[in-house]
Image: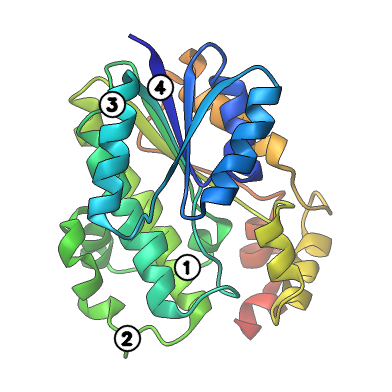
Amino acid sequence: MTDVIVVIGPGQIGQAIARRVGVGKHVLLADVRQENADAAAEVLENAGYEASVATVDVSSREAVHALVEAAAGLGDVTGLIHAAGVSPTQAAPATILRVDLYGRALVLEEFGNVVARGGAGVVISSQSGHRLPPLALEQNEALATTPAEELLGLPFLRPDQVADSLHAYQLAKRGNSLRVMAEAVRWGERGARVNTISPGIVMTPLAKDELGGPRGAGYQRMIEGSASGRAGTPDEVGTVGALLMGPDGGFITGSDFLMDGGVTAAYWYGDLAEVRAQQ
């Protein structure tokens, strides 16, 4: 059987990981827009990879289930890279929660039903989840374990409680890492692993939208006030993704890897306190 790597959201970060873990495997690239999947497939095929494409709306259980069936029809699903999502500048709070929180819970659940023994998944989250103040233990458990179809009905996620896009994004990203921790238990029963990467400002089209948006000055200040003094690159995220999905990461599951050049450290304990106050 052919090993299959599924990439949901095959943008710069998704492709960077796929290039490191997809050699000799079939890479299935899925995006809500057919043209995005086609463009990524052309790049990978020109570099010698075997690739195919699919469309998927991650906020639709029917669509996600269809993608799972398509992937399983190609071979053993040994890898999942989930890098799709929307940002605070791109969407309203309800859309962010539906795509970035509920949609990821759906994907983890559905692919957790078919992932092969020895397989691994990586969910791309965000440093924003680390900038949200601590939640109550009950809220953490709810984000981690509430059945996907009931998730958006949680009292603290209702529209009257989440009116700001950034707040919705931070909740979604905190929820991603908690959900992955809980799903790692279930995936482990199949002999598979799953982890989260929480990148900081990585130069992708989405990051450029944020830097050019209403919060752009704050993001630029974060870059300048961080220990690294620069934005990250998709290839740097790809290196961590390859570790987590490969044999060297065999002892790592249910974990969240913050890689932001020191932005979060400075946000809480350094010179970015004024950014925190503005948010």
Nearest to the eye among marks 1 and 3: give it: 3
Percent x, y for residue 61? 24, 54
Which is closer to the viewer, label 1 or label 4?
Answer: 4
Quarter of the picture containing the C terminus is bottom right
Cα separation between marks 3 and 4: 8 Å
Q: Is residue 134 left or right of residue 223?
A: left
Q: How is the image coloured?
A: rainbow
Q: Residue 170's mark?
A: 1
Which corner quadrant of the image does residue 110 belong to? top left
Give how far apart the Cα atoms at labels 4 and 2 are. Answer: 38 Å
**Label 1 vs label 4: CA separation?**
31 Å
Q: Is residue 26 visible?
A: yes
Q: Which residue is mark 3?
A: 72
> SS at mark 1?
helix
Q: Are marks 3 and 4 in contact (CB under 8 Å)?
A: yes
- Residue identified by numbered label 2: 159
184, above or below 213, in the image:
above
Sequence-wise first label, 1 or 2: 2
> Label 1 sits on what residue type?
Gln
